[in-house]
Image (cartoon, rainbow, N blue to C red):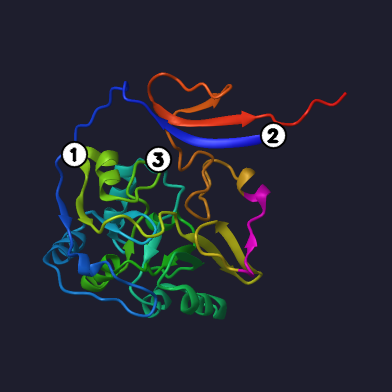
Amino acid sequence: MTIFIAAYSLANESRDARTRRTQVRTLAPSLFFCHNQFIAMIADPDIQKAAQILRSGGLVVFPTETVYGLGANALDPSAIRKIYALKGRPATSPLIVHVASIEQARDLAAEWPQEAERLAREYWPGPLTLVVPKKAVIPDEATAGLPTVGLRMPRHPVALALLREVGFPIAAPSANRFTQLSPTTAQHVREAFGDDTPFLLDGGPCEVGLESTVIAVTPDGLEVLRPGMAFVEDAQEEKPDAAATQPLEDAHRSPGQHKKHYSPRTRVLLVSRGHLPREGRGAYLWLAYNARAAF
């Protein structure tokens, strides 16, 4: 049996192409070059404005190498509650706290095991989140009441510039409504929030386009709580029964563990003998049986 998966788009579909006006800033292309060893960065007034909004308890959308984030002061419970309200996110889903350096991560952790130090030095800045015990300075609102916190140093130069400008960690889930697909462009953010879109730093398309890997650093070893782009060879997958048997009202150890999450709304069709619909947009699954019948 051969399986074909593809997309279709036909002209007869009517589509609302209206674009909402929001506060958007496009940063200089020279900001976008970065890799793990060197980051080219220049001062930008829009980053300064975003930092001021965060200092005043507001929300800011900013790019990371994974997806766009909806950020707030990670040390301000009131600001963090605004994230949950705008996204419609349940309080049982913790946030990832973004830091500007390994040193800042150590300052937020009640315990910083050697394995956390090793992974941070190997993978940061990059798409890996480390879950470690937190200090009291991180409010429970950011961690769903859990005694642990997910920390990550992003690789995108705009995110790093914002973190360094503001001077404190930024709590940021993906900049979308809860259960929707994560945004990888500024336009995705505008489509998700419309007129409610906060001040937005447009850093272009995200380099990775997939959420960070989340790994818990525990006394028993490394545990993958959410798979992502980063692969850590000696990390074990979370026991499948752990999330399945968890009561709905209990806090999740990591983002992305709800039964419904990252839910696409694209129409999906099972195609019979290659006949596509006459109109519309979507994806199709075409099963081609090419094996001879057994006699």
Amino acid type at mark 2? Met
Q: Are marks 2 and 1 in contact (CB under 8 Å)?
A: no
Query: Which is more N-terminal, label 1 or label 3?
Result: 3
Q: Nearer the viewer, residue 239 or 295?
A: 295
Q: Nearer the viewer, residue 153 or 67?
A: 67
Secondary structure at numbered mark 3 = loop
Q: Confirm whether the magenta stretch covers residue 240.
A: yes
Compared across the picture, whether 19 is left or right of 219 comes to: left
Amino acid type at mark 3? Gln
The residue segment tinted magenta is 233-242
Q: Position of residue 263 (x, y in %)?
A: 46, 38
Q: Report which residue position mark 3 lands on.
A: 180
The C terminus: image quadrant:
top right
Task: State which mark lies toward you, 2 or 1.
Answer: 2
- Mark 3, other Cα within 10 Å: few <14 / some 14–19 / many ≥20: some
Q: Position of residue 255 (x, y in %)?
A: 47, 52
Q: Confirm whether the magenta stretch covers residue 14.
A: no
Amino acid type at mark 1? Asp
Q: Position of residue 100 (x, y in %)?
A: 33, 73
Q: CA distance from mark 2 to mark 1?
A: 48 Å
Mark on residue 195?
A: 1
Q: Nearer the viewer, residue 94 or 281?
A: 281
Q: Report which residue position mark 2 lands on.
A: 1
Relative to 60, residue 130 above or below: below
Q: Residue at x 34, y 44 (%)?
A: 176
